[in-house]
Amino acid sequence: MKVVRCPNCRGACRVAPEAIGLLVVCPRCNGPFLAVEEAPVAPPPAPRPRRRPEPAPAGGRPARPRRSAEPVTPPGGHPGHDAPPHADPGRLPVSVLIGLALLPFAIPILWLIAPAVVGQEPMLSWAVPVALAVSASILCLAVIYTIDWSPGTRVKGVLMIVALAYFAALNLYFLKKQMVDEVRKFFGAGKDWVEVSADGYRVKMPTKPTQTDEQPMGQFVRLTCCRSSQKPPFIGEYYFVAGSSKSLGEEVPKGPAETDKWYNRAVDQIVAQSGGTHRGRIQYPTQQDSFIGRELEIEFADGRVRVVRIFLIKDRVYYLSVEGPGPPDEDLIEPFFESFLVPDAR
């Protein structure tokens, strides 16, 4: 047997010696080709009996018979094509697919090291680069597995998506504060807030509040509280609580020393009731200049932070708090705190 190769599919096959120079039919692509001898890939088996040539038709030269060839199995075990399976022009190696799909995940890493390089913190939270990386990676996988496209077209499409993702990340990192504020206002941060009047105070909250039974100061001072929430884009959900007491429930402290002791006890009760960790204690004046309150931050194990302001005005206690993911966003919580007013304080 002689080894020949089909010029159409490049598959190797065996033919009888007498078929060399004749047209044979490829057993893979069924295409006819002229048998040209190549080096045998295995010892030839015993020769088959020779077939008698068909008689030539009258008035013409004899027609060359078409013979069927036998496929050759190369040493690698893949019949037909001698090239390895990953060299199929319609597929890409698995390592290339994984590498291309993971390229966008370098965006959060760059956001992590960028402040140390450029000396500027991003205006947006970590949710932005993570969401950008995940969405870009999904798009890359969608392009990679588009079987109707050639490998070159798929690679170009993936590189274009990656380039756009990095360009978007660069612009979002250096986004100006003014633009962020405009976006937040457009989506409702500080826009069309509801003014709440209850128990001798007024304050603005992002949505219409509902009464809540929570007692942020425990049994130390019983409060009547209302609660509101807001979920700005790219940040997370914030919870707003406002409350007041009908009376102090004990003798009103007199003088700065007694007032400081009362505030220290109140702060300790608030921290203990919350279950978090106190991050510090500072004084903060209300809009009524003659009254001094306290502001404190409470950090929880899951990373949430609660900012609390309490005021002892005459014989009543007023409580305000904003809780959200990570460090407090001043642009979001200040409209709540700054709108607090006790009309009859004087």
Image (cartoon, rainbow, N blue to C red):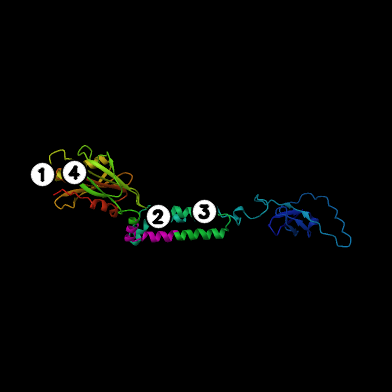
Q: Amino acid at mark 4?
A: Val
Judged from this view, the residue extending furthest toward the right is: 58
The residues bearing labels 2 and 4 have C-alpha atoms spaced at a distance of 43 Å
The residue mark sitting in front, 2 or 4, is 4
The residues bearing labels 2 and 1 have C-alpha atoms spaced at a distance of 53 Å
First in sequence: mark 1 vs mark 4:
1
The residue mark sitting in front, 1 or 4, is 4
Q: Which labelled disc corresponds to residue 142?
A: 3
Q: Does residue 32 appear anywhere in the picture?
A: yes
> Mark 4: few, some, or many residues within 10 Å (few <14, many ≥20)?
some
Q: Quadrant of residue 8?
A: bottom right
In percent of width and height, residue 84 lies at 62, 54
Q: Which labelled disc corresponds to residue 1?
A: none
First in sequence: mark 2 vs mark 1:
2
Q: Which residue is mark 1?
A: 254
In percent of width and height, residue 155 lies at 53, 59
Q: Which residue is mark 4?
A: 317
Question: Magenta segment range?
Answer: 165-183
Q: Which residue is mark 2?
A: 129
Q: Amino acid at mark 2?
A: Pro
Q: Secondary structure at mark 3?
A: helix
Q: Amino acid at mark 3?
A: Ala
> Mark 3: few, some, or many residues within 10 Å (few <14, many ≥20)?
some
In percent of width and height, residue 22 lies at 79, 59
